[in-house]
Amino acid sequence: MKIRTLALILITHSVVGALGFAAGIYMLPILTAPPAPSVEDIKLMSSQAKYTAQFKKDLKDSDALHWGEGTVSIGPKTITLMGQLAPGPDYKLYLSPKYVETEADFNRIKSSMVRVGDVKTFDNFVVQVPPGIEPSTYSSVIIWCEAFGQFITSAKYQ
């Protein structure tokens, strides 16, 4: 086999392998996600909410792969989303004393935030608020991808 042919095979196989790996990282959370809560469940749980806010796609650090949209409801026991998030791995829900919409801002004030829990579904979600966390002492809710350090979305609720 000629060196040129061998190099071409190596390059094309490497590109296909890299694309497959990237597609796998993107698709795995979708394939392994539990069933999303129903609209009725979200409505029932959000009826207990003290605050509501909107996730929007057009935030500074949101892009085609990192976004959220819909109504987020913050109550003393649950935080719910009636809407959608871009699929991804290792999403965490944080409450923050300040509104942020960039990775840099998130990292700058992360020590003053509280991590509420994991977000495991991308069409609607319910996250239980652990005992000892009082949402009224914060002003914003943030979805963050812990594995890749990516800002997904945020909303100011008070």
Image (cartoon, rainbow, N blue to C red):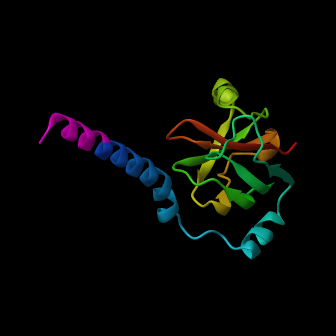
Lateral position of residue 79 relative to residue 148, left or right: right
Specify the quadrant of the image occupied by residue 126: bottom right
Image spot of residue 28 (x, y percent): 45, 57
Query: Which image quarter is the C terminus in?
Result: top right
| Residue 95 visible within the image | yes
Count all numbered tags in the image, as a single digit: 0
From the top left corner, tell me how far across and down residue 48 is, in percent: 82, 63
Residue 26 in the image, given as x and y percentages of width and height:
49, 52
Residue 105, picture quadrant: top right
Q: Which residue is drawn at 23% across and 36% down?
A: 7
- Residue at (49%, 41%) from the top-left corner? 147
Vertical position of residue 59 compared to residue 83: above or below? above
Magenta: main secondary structure: helix
Relative depth, front residue between 28 and 65: 65
Q: Is residue 141 above or below residue 87?
A: above
The residue at the far left in this view is 1
36 left or right, relative to 60: left
Based on the picture, tell me whether residue 63 belongs to the magenta stretch. no
Taking depth in this image into account, of 76 and 155 the one nearest to the observer is 155
Residue projecting furthest to the top: 108
Q: Nearer the viewer, residue 24 or 92?
A: 24
The residue shown at (62%, 68%) is 36
Q: What stretch is highlighted in magenta?
A: 1-11
